[in-house]
Image: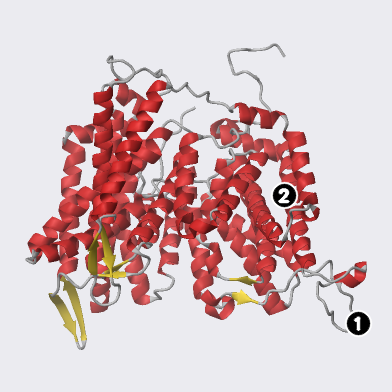
Amino acid sequence: MSLTPATPRSAAGPLDLPARLRDAGLAAFVAFMLFLPLVGFRLEGAEGRLGLAWRPDWVVIGTAAVFLGHLALSIVRSLRPRAVRPAGAGPFGRFVSRHALWLGGAGVAFALALPFLPFSSRYVIDVATTLLIYVMLGWGLNIVVGLAGLLDLGYVAFYAVGAYSFALGYHWFGLGFWEALPLSGALAALFGILLGFPVLRLRGDYLAIVTLGFGEIIRIVLLNWVQVTRGPNGISGIPRPTFFGIEFTRQPAEGELAFHQLFGIDYSPDHRVIFLYYLILALALLTNVFVLRLRRLPIGRAWEALREDEIACKALGINPTNTKLTAFALGAMFGGFAGTFFATRQGFISPESFTFIESATILAIVVLGGMGSQLGVVLAAAVIVLLPEFGREFEQFRMLLFGAAMVGIMVWRPRGLLAHREPTVRLHVRGAHEERPR
Amino acid sequence: MYYFLQQLVNGVTLGAMYGLIAIGYSMVYGIIGMINFAHGEIYMIGAFISIISFLLLGILGITWVPLALLLVLLLAMVFTATYGWTVERLAYRPLRGSFRLAPLISAIGMSIFLQNYVQLLQGANVKPLPPVVTGGWVLGRDGTFTVQISNIQVIIIVLTVLLMTVFSWLIAKTPLGRAQRACEQDLKMAALCGVDVDRTISLTFVMGAALAAVAGLMATLYYGVIDFFIGFLAGIKAFTAAVLGGIGSIPGAMLGGLLLGLVEAFWSGYFSTEYKDVAAFCILVVVLIFLPTGLLGKPEVEKV
């Protein structure tokens, strides 16, 4: 498809109006067929008898809009022939990857300063905390999808394992946040290994469906195992994190110190919010540093090599199953950490928070960012988390637009907002044709 | 024994519906190697179009059940197929030749979009349809327990067998089927030999959507209630069925669907209904460990 240059469709000049009208008419006909049953009629009255309402005006408006839109679009396109898009990064992607270091530094500096900037408010910090949770999840999943090239559609399961292991650990054994954090990471990694061990030797697409099924299994078990997880009611009263044992309360218990007393400042409920923000920032940065360092280790190289060519890896003596398993387990571990943080931040968790939509969102962040690109994940997470925030007025259209945006961005930039990350090392920098003496 | 028989009947009915959806997944995967995540939503749309068609026919005064069923079947197939075609045209065709995950993300986006589209247009509440086909046959009686096969179940099973036969003939004997099989083996080579690849892929989506619409109609008749969210679980289950039978293989999809339906029916009959989905996925994992290509899948030879 990339071989065919952009030529005008017919010899009748660039503005072949009859042909364009015919195309637009066809599009309008298809739109009419689409709109007629579902837009034209509306089922009404859920209880008892179902009625049918008829709204022909919507169908007419919709069809007309498609006709005119198609016509306008095709005329605009013919006046400005589309250049063949280069396969690699666009100018934006190249700019970002060239200046990744200082862009990343600036980002971290901004994130550190955010709570003290003039425009910052409790709302801003709350949104930023949510954003950072998704960034961290994205970075965790990036190990699995971006580096090792494994398709995981059930990442939210590990997030749920992390959240529930803290909630249940507190509920049954009285564990605090700091004790639960490593434990939940380990548990999530264990689940990753248990799941990955049988299925990682299979073809990639089977992995996708098995992980998707696993995500559902975890959710169904959480929902139905009422004696332990309290089912759909969820678990509330999860303790807030402490500043290494010092609580954020106005009146601490007898003989204990609260945060504001320790530092000699006035009490403010914002302290805890800001602390949570810094906590997730630290966790996310830890994930990032970890991933960046792993990339330079033999195991990281092996992941990228496996992603590029599995057969060559086998020939070189890399054990693909074990290598994938480590990626899977490490990715799961970070999902578990993020889950623990989520539980302590919300104070309440229920299976509702761990649906497939979450998995899809996280995967969308990784792929939209350009698989394997750490900065791309931040950018994509910002797009996905902040867009719905701006669209609060269109609450009911939020998910509709979210779905449409996912399709739109993929069609517009299939390789993600920042380009697909190249392998860290490569023998011939400019491909096989230009062989340099080494 | 009679209880077993009853579960068998229920399982085969369920399996027929899963199988019809699974074929759509399997065909698309066979040809372009992508998981058409929006296929479950297509099934849901089929169910909605069926229920709307039923009400419309009721208003028009066509109440003779066989005729009404036939008309609804046709309407649902045609309109749902349009949705299948459009989804492919808008969300997948621009991404052909792109890297592997791009169409998948696009498909997930499409699935979210369609779900909310129907929810916004038709409302979020459950839509009940009064029973259209009633009555049934008693197969056996054991004290107070009777084994029944309802007329709806008979219709579902017969219709599925019929469609499968037509469909197998379509794939095996017609020029379209030949083009599809050629595309399945090698897209580029098929194009060089004069197969219109874009058209073949479009028609594959149309056929898959039409079969999903039939499954949607069956679900509407069988369960009597639908809502905008039924596509998700049915989609996952049907994909599981397709993988179970060996993805890319049409008889495999049917067999996988049947097997999944039976597992679910027996599990809910003998153990618990809450964990029937868990059982279905566990079966999938077990089968994949021992038969990595599914039951009827061809082993894929990887070449360097």
Q: Residues within 10 Å of mark 2 (few under 14, many from 20)?
A: many
Q: Chain of mark 2?
A: A
Decide which of B301, A410 is in the foreground and name it.
A410
User: For the residue marked with disc 2, what is the amino acid?
Assistant: Thr
Q: Which residue is mark 1?
A: A255
Please indicate, yes or no, whether residue A209 appears anywhere in the rendered image. Answer: yes
- Binning the other alpha carbons within 10 Å of mark 1 as few (below 14), some (14 to 19) or many (20 upward) gives few
Residue at position x 33%, y 35% in the image: A70
Question: Circle 2 is placed at which residue position?
Answer: A287
Where residue A237 appears, x then y in whole percent? 67, 77
Q: Spot the residue most to the bottom.
A: B143
Q: Is residue A317 left or right of residue A361?
A: right
Q: Earlier in the sequence, mark 2 or mark 1?
A: 1
As helix, strand or loop, the secondary structure at mark 1 comes to loop
Total label count?
A: 2
Q: Quadrant of residue B133?
A: bottom left
In the rendered view, tell whether residue A184 sits above or below residue B117.
Answer: below
Q: Is residue B79 left or right of residue A158?
A: left
Determine whether B143 is above or below B10 in the image.
below
Which kind of residue does numbered mark 1 sit on?
A: Gly
CB atoms of marks 2 and 1 within 8 Å: no
- Residue at 52% x, 67% y is A352
User: What chain letter is assigned to the residue under label 1?
Assistant: A
> Vertically, is A295 above or below A117?
above
Of A415 and A13, nearer the camera is A13
Residue B150 place in picture, x, y as percent = 17, 72
What x and y, as percent, mark residue B204? 28, 40
